[in-house]
C-alpha cells in the first residue's frame, strides 16, 4: 500500500513528498491566517458600531469562525499549489537567488501598482467606507503581509496553478483567473454594505483588478510565488499612506 501511495504521489506531483507539502502548507496557512486577523478584527468591529444588537461575544465568535475557515482555505490552497506546480512546469516558490537580483524592479512594480490603485480607486472609495481601511498603525502594517501571503497563496499558488493544469497553457490560466478575480470583490462590497458600488468606481475596480492579476499571474508562471509576494507586499504599503492622510 505504501508503494502505491508513493507511486501516486510521484505521478501527480513529480516527486513532491506529501509530508513535506503538508507541513509547508500548514505553516503557510497559519502565517496567512495570522496576517489577516488584525484586518478582520478592524472590519468586524467597524461594521458593528452601528448595530447595537451585536455583542462583543458574538463578534469574537465570528472572528474565530472566520479565522478557522481562512486557515482551512489557505492550507488546502497551499497543498494544491505546492503539490501540482511541479507537474505543470511552474516555478512554484521561485529562485531566491534570482529574487535578490531582481528586487529593484519588483519594488518599482509594487509602487507603481499602489500609486495607480490609490489614484484610480482608493481616494474615491475611502470616504464611502472608511471602516474598510486600517484604523491603527498595527492594522496598516499587517495588510502588506495579508496581501503577500493570503491573497497570493489563494490566487496565484492555488488558482493559477490549477487553471494552468486544466487549460494546459500558462497564459490561458493567467487570463482565466484575472477574469474571475474581480468577482470575488462583489461579495466583499456586499459584506461591508456598499452594494451596489457606483458604476464608475465598479468599472475602475474591475479594470485595476484585472490588470493587477494579469501582471501578477505572468510573474508567477515566469518567476514564482516569492516574486509575487514581494510585489504584493510593497503594494500593500499604500494602506499606511492612506492612514497617514486620513489622520
Image (cartoon, rainbow, N blue to C red):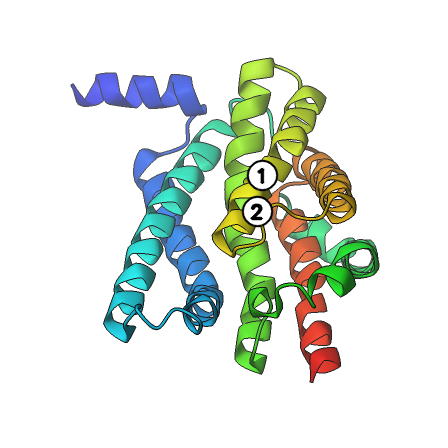
Q: Nearer the viewer, residue 17 or 227?
A: 227
Residue 239 position, x and y percent, is 67, 69
Q: According to the image, label 2 marks what residue?
A: 152
Question: On screen, 240 above or below 162?
Answer: below
Helix, strand or loop for disc 2: helix
Q: Count residues near mark 1 (Cα–Cα under 10 Å), then give few for <14, some for 14-19, many for 20+.
A: many
Helix, strand or loop for disc 1: helix
Residue 148 position, x and y percent, is 59, 55
Q: Nearer the viewer, residue 5 or 42?
A: 42
Pick the quarter of the image with the C terminus: bottom right
- The residue lying at 78 percent from left, 53 percent from top is 102
Q: Count residues near mark 2 (Cα–Cα under 10 Å), then give few for <14, some for 14-19, many for 20+.
A: many
Q: Is residue 92 visible?
A: no
- The residue lying at 58 percent from left, 81 percent from top is 137
In the image, 216: left or right of 158?
A: right
Q: Is residue 225 visible?
A: yes
| Quarter where residue 118 is shown | bottom right
- The residue lying at 26 percent from left, 66 percent from top is 58
Q: CA distance from mark 2 to mark 1?
A: 5 Å
Q: Nearer the viewer, residue 238 or 222?
A: 238
Q: Nearer the viewer, residue 15 or 105?
A: 105
Q: Are marks 2 and 1 in contact (CB under 8 Å)?
A: yes
Q: According to the image, label 1 marks what residue?
A: 156
Residue 144 position, x and y percent, is 61, 64
| Quarter where residue 75 is shown | top left
Amino acid at each position: 500500500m505504501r508503494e502505491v501511495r508513493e507511486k501516486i504521489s510521484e505521478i501527480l506531483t513529480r516527486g513532491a513528498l506529501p509530508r513535506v507539502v503538508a507541513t509547508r502548507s500548514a505553516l503557510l496557512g497559519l502565517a496567512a491566517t495570522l496576517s489577516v486577523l488584525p484586518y478582520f478584527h478592524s472590519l468586524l468591529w467597524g461594521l458593528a458600531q452601528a448595530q447595537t444588537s451585536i455583542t462583543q461575544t458574538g463578534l469574537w465568535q465570528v472572528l474565530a469562525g472566520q479565522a478557522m475557515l481562512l486557515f482551512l482555505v489557505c492550507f488546502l490552497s497551499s497543498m494544491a499549489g505546492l503539490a501540482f506546480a511541479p507537474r505543470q512546469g511552474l516555478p512554484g516558490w521561485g529562485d531566491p537567488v534570482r529574487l535578490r537580483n531582481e528586487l529593484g524592479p519588483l519594488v518599482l512594480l509594487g509602487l507603481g501598482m499602489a500609486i495607480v490603485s490609490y489614484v484610480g480607486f482608493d481616494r474615491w472609495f475611502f470616504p464611502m467606507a472608511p471602516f474598510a481601511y486600517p484604523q491603527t498603525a498595527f492594522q496598516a502594517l499587517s495588510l502588506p503581509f495579508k496581501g503577500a501571503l493570503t491573497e497570493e497563496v489563494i490566487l496565484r499558488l492555488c488558482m493559477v496553478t490549477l487553471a494552468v493544469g486544466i487549460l494546459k497553457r500558462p497564459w490561458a490560466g493567467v487570463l482565466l483567473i484575472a477574469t474571475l478575480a474581480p468577482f470575488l470583490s462583489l461579495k466583499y462590497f456586499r459584506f461591508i454594505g456598499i452594494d451596489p458600488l457606483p458604476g464608475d468606481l465598479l468599472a475602475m475596480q474591475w479594470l485595476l483588478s484585472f490588470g493587477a492579476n494579469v501582471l501578477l499571474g505572468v510573474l508567477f508562471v515566469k518567476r514564482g510565488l516569492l516574486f509575487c509576494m514581494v510585489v504584493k507586499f510593497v503594494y500593500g504599503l499604500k494602506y499606511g499612506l492612506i492612514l497617514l492622510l486620513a489622520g
